[in-house]
Amino acid sequence: MTEQNGRLYPDSELEAQLVEWLPHQRWFAAKGHTITGVRVVLRQPLAEEPGFGADHLLVAVTFDSTPEQIYQVPLGYRSHLPDELVPATITAPDKAARHSVFVYDGLRDQEVIGLYAQSLALGGTRGPIDLHTVPGTQIEPGMRGRALSAEQSNTSVVLGEQLLLKMFRRVTLGINPDVELHLALAEVECRSVAPIRAWIEADIDGVRTTLAMVQDFAANSADGWSMALGSVRDLLIEGDLRADEVGTDFAGEAHRMGVAVAEVHAHLAAGLGESERSAAELAAGMVGRLEAAAAEVDELAAFVPDLRALFGEVAMLGPVAVQRIHGDLHLGQVLRTPERWLLIDFEGEPAKSLAERRRPDTTLRDVAGMLRSFDYAAHHSVREREPDGVATQREFRAGEWAQRNSAAFCDGYAATSGSDPRGIGALLRAYEVDKAVYEVVYEARNRPTWLRLPLNAIRRLTQP
């Protein structure tokens, strides 16, 4: 690049600026840890024009108390920055350093997004980066794009209102399960996911590593979390009606959602096989996660004895069937299209290692994740500081909503799979608690005002 559009902006100065910028990003996974260094791993030029440039950038970030992490930060360079891109600024022109360009997050710029769309249409290799398309897929050239504004751990971009490009912000060395499982589901023609069309990968430290994926964009869809919140809101407003009497009763959708999840599980088992793990091994993992969480969040200490006892019951169950699963299923990971429910985002829990996310587990982990999400949606709208009588009534109605929709979901799952997930009550409850323990740590780190939600759930789940 020229100095005007960024190419002479040295790695060392970018690294210094990113130390300050990264911790403020929603998708940055190491909040609470101090960055000790940033190192450019890959910097591939995408464009070089007067007043404008773009690079595809990967950086390794080191910390004082947690292992190194790798992040993708597609960069844009402009000599004049439009107002709408100001919030995406990483660094502004600096006369003292003789730099006359703005450096910013390129995935907020339609022109930079267009460079990725054009590269996907052409396919092939761009330096160390490989662009693959699923056989039979043709991506139209010249598509314009827009980044979705929803907060998430990755950045999703709609291309031409036809495709969804998902850039994995935190990169784990290896093949991302989202690509791996979507390709497997495509082989068995699963209709409960949006078809994958392409993916991007590169060699990072000698390992083939997924950078992004492209699938059909589910236009005219609504996410399950928003729909569930609307249903809960209407129930709490209609104080004299039962959940099944409210016009936005969600139970029918919860049932259909259970059907979709069971179908995906069946397709994953057919495509990737099944095996067994001992319940003692599964329980040991739960105990380990509990101990790590209790060491970080003091409020968990009072629950540890009861949770250990529950996990001890699980350890006595013997062999358990396992397979590849979604791994981080909740209401925000399902979309209601005019035709059906779709499952999205098969990456697994981002806090886990790639090996852990790819390891077969019981389908009950996904079921428990959805039951926890119904509970979250129900109690999210109940305020703590309401008059006692009002709070008690709203709490009762929220619990009623959660129980009704959890039962409907399990009924739909059982009708399709032939196996009721409530059949092994101790194991399902243990998975619900394990998920709630994960939520406690997440909320303590990211949304302390929400910490009461998983803590109250653990209290309910451990009551006789």
Image (cartoon, rainbow, N blue to C red):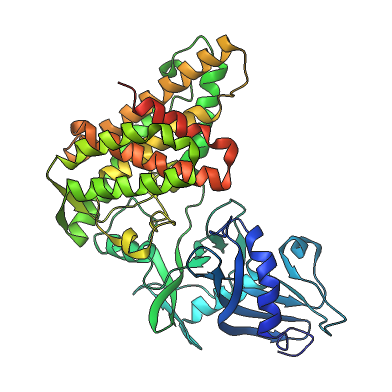
Q: In which quarter of the image is the C terminus?
A: top left
Please give the count of numbered marks on the rendered protein: 0
Which residue is pictured at 39% across the width and 44% down the height?
339
Q: In this view, does 415 lie above or below 267?
A: above
Which residue is pictured at 40% across the width and 39% down the height?
436
Q: In this view, does 132 lie above or below 380?
A: below
Seen from the viewer's position, the closer of residues 241 and 159 is: 241
Which residue is pictured at 34% across the width and 52% down the height?
327
Q: Where is residue 460 in the image (x, y as percent from the top left)?
A: 38, 25
Indicate left or right for 171 with 382 as reference. Answer: left
Q: Residue furthest left?
A: 318
Q: Which residue lies furthest to the right in this view?
A: 95
The quadrant holding residue 49 is: bottom right
The quadrant holding residue 23 is: bottom right
Q: Where is residue 332 in the image (x, y as percent from the top left)?
A: 47, 45
Q: Position of residue 288 (x, y in %)?
A: 33, 49
Q: Is residue 57 above or below residue 355?
A: below
The quadrant holding residue 459 is: top left
Q: Quadrant of the N terminus?
A: bottom right
Seen from the viewer's position, the closer of residues 1 and 310 is: 310
Indicate left or right for 155 with 190 as reference. Answer: right
Q: Position of residue 400 (x, y in %)?
A: 41, 19
Residue 236 visible, this angle: yes
Which residue is pictured at 30% across the width and 40% down the height?
431
Seen from the viewer's position, the closer of residues 433 and 337 is: 433
Indicate left or right for 260 with 166 as reference. Answer: left
Residue 108 visible, this angle: no
